[in-house]
Amino acid sequence: MDYPYKIPLRKTRLYLLAVVALFMSVMGIPILLKGASTFHEPYQLYVMALMAINTLFFGGCTVNIFQQARKKDQGLIIDSYGVEIKLHTVHRMIAWEEITDIRSLKYADAHFILVDVVDPEKYMTGGSLFRRAWKRNLKKFGTPIAIPTGNLDKKHEEILELLTREFEQYRALPEDLRLELKERIVENNFRTA
């Protein structure tokens, strides 16, 4: 066990996504500068409003994606305590003792690792947008935690195998070692809080 296992984000994919978002943002600028005079009278205001929203939305996406791509500690961290998810705006630590199962899912051409936990309600925190996403995941997949592996720098199968192996090794530990790990988790969380 060479802890911690760090699986970083796939930076090139994020930079390409940021360039696409930048292109989408810049597309609306000429219409905003010239005005929507080429469109019929009743639609000019709507076109201007849509182009302003387009420019602001994709401009914000570009800045956000560039910021995420530049962060060094983003990705997935697997250690003796559990799994730490640091993807974009989601930062979550899941202790091995709280995990009941690890599954794979392909949904809408994207691969996910589903982590079943003892108390799903505990993970439905954050703003209202996040809570709705967690609840939707729970209703659709049976767990609030769905880790997208498309932007991680390892193949989906490798990440699933690593997580499954580490989870099985944790479950094979004697109860006294599990208790010691749990006490260290509580102690570390108390120190960092």
Image (tube, rainbow, N blue to C red):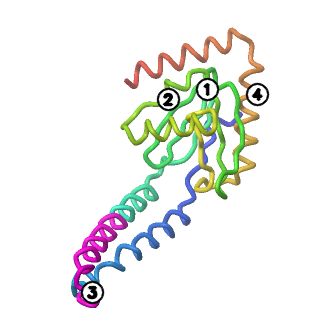
Element class at badge 2: helix
Give the residue at x 43% y 46%.
89
Vertical arrangement, residue 176 with respect to residue 135, above or below? above
Q: Which mark is residue 40?
A: 3
Give the residue at x 58% y 25%.
95
Q: Amino acid at mark 4?
A: Glu
Which residue position is annotated with label 4?
Answer: 168
Few, some or many residues within 10 Å of mark 1 (<14, 14–19, 20+): many
Q: CA distance from mark 3 to mark 1?
A: 56 Å
CB within 8 Å, label 1 to label 2: yes
Which residue position is annotated with label 2?
Answer: 123
- Residue 94 lies in the magenta stretch: no
Sequence-wise, which precedes: disc 2 or disc 4?
2
Q: Nearer the viewer, residue 32 or 99?
A: 32
User: Percent position (x, y) of residue 150?
Assistant: 62, 55
Q: Amino acid at mark 2?
A: Tyr
Q: Nearer the viewer, residue 1 or 43?
A: 43
User: Percent position (x, y) of residue 192?
Assistant: 40, 25
Element class at badge 3: loop
Few, some or many residues within 10 Å of mark 2 (<14, 14–19, 20+): some
